[in-house]
Image (spheres, helix red, strand yellow):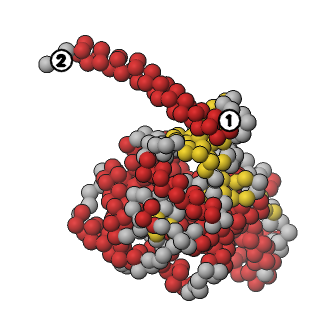
């Protein structure tokens, strides 16, 4: 039995020496890359700087001097060999991938073309943050999806799929492996209880559905904005070494439903049309079948991604994977709004998963609440208690006022006599049509951007008739149309009502 002192000494040893070993290993890598650089250029590199990496076990370095190159150290020779074969084949096919200039004898190190520092993921950063993508950002995305069929079809022409690693094709084994990856690395990590036999039954059904779309095309497998670089305004493909023969649906799902890309549905539909148009160059497309089959791949890819997030985030403690989980869970919620009758038990488990407290708490933080108020101008415009200071204030005083007539003075805009007066007159209906157009657009955008509060106020002379009618109808309209939570306040009438969210 060792003493506590012994274990503390051992821990101290590792804390001291592990960083030393890490530095020595890095030095060894840079020395090997320097040898390759000198062999290729004839002169040593002036500077070698390590570049950041995320989910990959490969390490990247920028070597500058006579020529700027990217040095790569990969611990898996088999994976390196797959990449080197694919890069050479795709270059020969005229596809935009980095050129490999020189490879070490053991294939652990190689130097490739430097494509710069701009990932597509970063080039669309403003759009991702706001869900409002500029025309420039949209054009980069269009260019990328239009190129995708080329690598899938032209890239597969003459391709030796036996060179793929770890396996040559998308098959039942790889599907079930990914689904179990999700089960063991994510689902079980949440602490949820479920019946494994029933879950496995639905996994098998999903495998059958996905494999009915098999094709002799190149499946990139991790086609997403972090694996596309932008050079001189054009997209270039990187990190394709995990590719294999498989259906083209997978890459479409991977790209357009990337969790942290946060493409609004309108943009996603636009990009899908761009992809289908480019795809027609290679084969005819039955669009209804395309869309019906695609949604199965989107569900599958979402589960595979959650498995990766679980492993990289929960087990390897890499923060950006943990940060991505809520976005993938939201994708899952959206997918489950439309039934998958093929997988009844799986869908029940997934719905339960999305309702776990750790995920609903995050959802509540990002859920939109619209506060709608009626008020009297003579008592001042209401303050915004959220501190956002934004929203709309609509002046109802241009609308014909029932308060001018003695018989309407005892009533409010909630009462039938006033409602009939306003609607028969018609001015308030035209007024609200314009209000709905403005507010609907904001609510839609606020929901897409994950904003939590919007304020809409209606003012009239006394805060009794026109403003009350308008606020009431807008509140009901927004709750009915968007399912958002609406807090309705008729300030001067001392009336409050909450319409709970249904989304």
Compared to residue 448, the image places residue 321 above or below, namely above
Please indicate whether residue 377 sits to the left or right of residue 420 in the image. right
Q: CA distance from mark 1 to mark 2?
A: 56 Å
Q: Residue sitting at 35 percent across and 17 percent down?
A: 12
On residue 2, the disc is: 2
| Residue drawn at (83%, 66%) of the image | 397
Camera-nearest residue between 267 and 96: 96
Q: Earlier in the sequence, mark 1 or mark 2?
A: 2
Residue extending farthest top: 5
Q: Position of residue 52 (x, y in %)?
A: 58, 39
Q: Position of residue 217 (x, y in %)?
A: 51, 73
Relative vertical location of residue 361 with respect to residue 29 in this rendering, above or below: below
Residue at the farthest left position: 1
- Residue 175 in the image, given as x and y percentages of width and height: 37, 66
The residue to which callout 1 is attached is 42
Image check: 370 left or right of 345? right
Crowding around mark 2 (Cα neighbors within 10 Å: few <14, some 14 to 19, many 20+) is few
- The structure residue drawn at horizontal position 39% and vertical position 62%, both measured from the top left corner, is 167
Quadrant in the picture for the N terminus: top left
Q: 185 above or below 413?
A: above
User: What is the residue that sits farthest to the right in this orientation?
Assistant: 398
Residue nearest the observer in this picture, 305 or 188: 305
Q: Secondary structure at mark 1?
A: loop
């Amino acid at each position: 039995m060792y003493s506590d002192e012994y274990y503390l000494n051992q821990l101290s040893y590792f804390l001291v020496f592990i960083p030393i070993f890490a530095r020595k290993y890095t030095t060894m890598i840079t020395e090997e890359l320097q040898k390759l650089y000198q062999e290729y250029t004839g002169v040593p590199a002036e500077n070698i700087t390590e570049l950041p990496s995320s989910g990959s076990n490969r390490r990247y370095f920028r070597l500058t001097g006579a020529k700027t190159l990217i040095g790569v150290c990969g611990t898996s020779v088999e994976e390196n060999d797959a990449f080197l074969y694919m890069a050479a084949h795709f270059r020969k096919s005229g596809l935009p991938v980095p050129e490999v200039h020189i490879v070490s004898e053991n294939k652990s190190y190689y130097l490739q073309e430097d494509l710069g520092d701009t990932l597509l993921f970063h080039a669309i950063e403003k759009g991702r943050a706001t869900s409002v993508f500029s025309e420039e950002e949209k054009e980069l995305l269009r260019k990328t999806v239009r190129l995708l069929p080329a690598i899938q079809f032209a890239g597969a022409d003459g391709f030796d799929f036996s060179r793929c690693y770890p396996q040559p094709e998308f098959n039942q084994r790889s599907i079930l492996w990914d689904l179990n990856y999700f089960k063991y690395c994510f689902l079980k990590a949440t602490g949820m209880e479920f019946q494994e036999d029933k879950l496995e039954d639905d996994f098998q059904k999903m495998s059958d559905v996905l494999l009915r779309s098999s094709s002799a095309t190149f499946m990139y497998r991790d086609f997403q904005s972090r694996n596309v670089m932008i050079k001189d305004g054009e997209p270039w493909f990187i990190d394709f070494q995990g590719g294999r023969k498989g259906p083209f649906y997978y890459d479409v799902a991977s790209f357009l439903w990337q969790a942290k890309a946060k493409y609004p549905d309108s943009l996603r539909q636009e990009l899908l049309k761009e992809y289908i148009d480019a795809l027609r160059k290679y084969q005819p497309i039955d669009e209804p079948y395309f869309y019906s089959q695609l949604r199965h791949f989107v569900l599958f890819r979402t589960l595979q991604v959650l498995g990766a997030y679980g492993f990289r985030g929960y087990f390897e403690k890499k923060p950006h994977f943990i940060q991505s989980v809520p976005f993938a869970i939201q994708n899952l919620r959206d997918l489950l709004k439309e039934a998958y009758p093929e997988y009844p038990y799986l869908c029940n488990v997934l719905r339960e998963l999305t309702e776990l407290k750790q995920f609903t708490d995050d959802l509540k933080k990002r859920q939109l609440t619209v506060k709608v108020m009626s008020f009297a101008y003579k008592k001042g415009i209401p303050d915004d208690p959220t501190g956002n200071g934004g929203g709309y204030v609509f002046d109802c005083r241009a609308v014909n006022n029932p308060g001018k007539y003695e018989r309407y003075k005892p009533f409010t805009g909630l009462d039938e006599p006033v409602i009939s007066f306003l609607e028969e007159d018609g001015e308030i209906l035209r007024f609200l049509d314009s209000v709905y157009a403005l507010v609907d657009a904001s609510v839609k955008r606020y929901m897409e951007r994950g904003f939590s509060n919007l304020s809409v106020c209606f003012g009239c002379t006394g805060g009794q008739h026109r403003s009350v009618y308008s606020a009431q109808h807008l509140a009901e309209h927004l709750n009915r149309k968007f399912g958002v939570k609406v807090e309705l306040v008729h300030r001067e009438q001392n009336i409050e009502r909450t319409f709970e969210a249904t989304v």
